[in-house]
Image: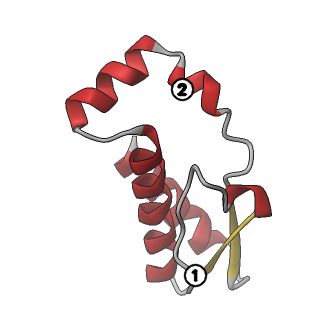
Amino acid sequence: VVNYTSGLFAAVADMFPSTLLSTGGDEVNMPCYTDDAETQEALQASGQDLTQALTSFVTTMHDTLRGKAKTPVVWEGARSEEIHLDRH
């Protein structure tokens, strides 16, 4: 999922001249993931909790965009206690 989504963001970044690209992030429904057995099994297997996994995912997407000379933009709701983002 990470490699596919990173490739998708890279392709989209190449399509548009703007230096800004939104990655959203405010629409994550945390109970959907915490209540899903398959997600919880995958998290346990990875040794991460949901916050760590989401933070890692979003950070990877943002690093992909920065590598394309884009500035990732998120909605304010994405900067919550569930997802920890660096400010660049």
> Tag 2: Cα neighbours inside 10 Å, few (<14), some, or many (≥20)?
few
Residue at the disc numbered 2:
33
Q: Is residue 4 visible?
A: no
Question: On the picture, is 46 further left or further right than 17?
Answer: left
Q: Secondary structure at mark 1?
A: loop
> Whole-Å distance between the Cαs marked 2 and 1?
26 Å
Question: Does residue 36 sit above or below 75 in this rendering?
Answer: above
The residue shown at (59%, 82%) is 70
Question: On the picture, is 20 further left or further right than 60?
Answer: right
The amino acid type found where label 2 is placed reads: Tyr
Q: Which mark is residue 87?
A: 1
Q: Position of residue 18 (x, y in %)?
A: 73, 82
The amino acid type found where label 1 is placed reads: Arg
Question: Does residue 39 sit above or below 59 in this rendering?
Answer: above
Q: Position of residue 45 (x, y in %)?
A: 21, 29
Choose top left, top right, bottom left or bottom right for residue 31.
top right
Q: Position of residue 82 (x, y in %)?
A: 57, 49
Point out the residue furthest to the top here: 37
> Tag 1: Cα neighbours inside 10 Å, few (<14), some, or many (≥20)?
few
